[in-house]
Amino acid sequence: MSAPTTPQHIHGPGPRVHGASTRLHWWALALPALAFGLLLLLLAGSGQAHAATGEASAILRVTEQILRVVG
């Protein structure tokens, strides 16, 4: 009886991996994009900073609407 020249299955000390799966969840792309957009809005609006008045800023209104929808 002869031994095979190439090993059929080699199992190391780690977990068995049968195939690489690289699927991302929707939030893995949405959250960084949202954070980037909000930071960009903050930077773009900082050049026109004025003393606080009675009206709310656009970012504050958008944030309140998002919190109403999510909460």
Image (cartoon, rainbow, N blue to C red):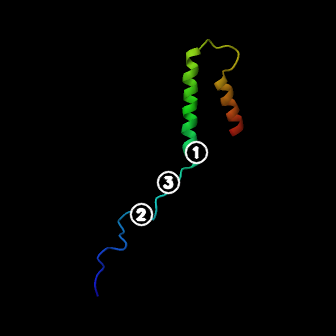
> What's the residue type where badge 2 is placed?
Pro
Measured as percent of width and height from the top left, residue 54 is found at 70, 15
The residue type indicated by label 1 comes to Trp
The CA span between labels 1 and 2 is 27 Å
**Which residue occupies 29% across, 76% down?**
5
Q: Are marks 1 and 3 in contact (CB under 8 Å)?
A: no
Quadrant housing the C terminus: top right
Residue bearing mark 3:
22
Mark 1 crowdedness (10 Å alpha carbons): few <14, some 14-19, many ≥20: few
Judged left or right of residue 66, residue 16 is: left
Inter-mark Cα distance, 1 to 3? 14 Å
Q: In the image, which is nearer the foreground, mark 2 or mark 3?
A: 3
Query: In the rendered structure, are the residues bearing label 1 and label 2 in contact, judged by CB atoms less than 8 Å apart?
Result: no
Q: Residues within 10 Å of mark 2 (few under 14, many from 20)?
A: few
- Residue at point 33%, 73% (across, down): 7
- For marks 1 and 3, the one nearer the N-term is 3
Name the residue at 58% across, 20% down. Answer: 45
Above or below, 60 against 21 in this view is: above
Q: Earlier in the sequence, mark 1 or mark 2?
A: 2
Residue placed under numbered mark 1 in the picture: 27
Q: Quadrant of residue 70?
A: top right
Q: Is residue 44 above or below residue 24?
A: above
* Disc 2 from disc 3: Cα separation: 17 Å
Whether residue 71 is visible: no
Three-letter amino acid code at the position of disc 3? Thr
Quadrant position of the N terminus in the picture: bottom left
SS at mark 2?
loop
Height in image: 61 above or below 49? below
| Pointers 2 and 3 in contact (C-beta within 8 Å) | no
Q: Residue 30 appears at what percent x and percent y?
A: 58, 41
The residue that mark 2 highlights is: 15
* Residue at point 35%, 66% (across, down): 12
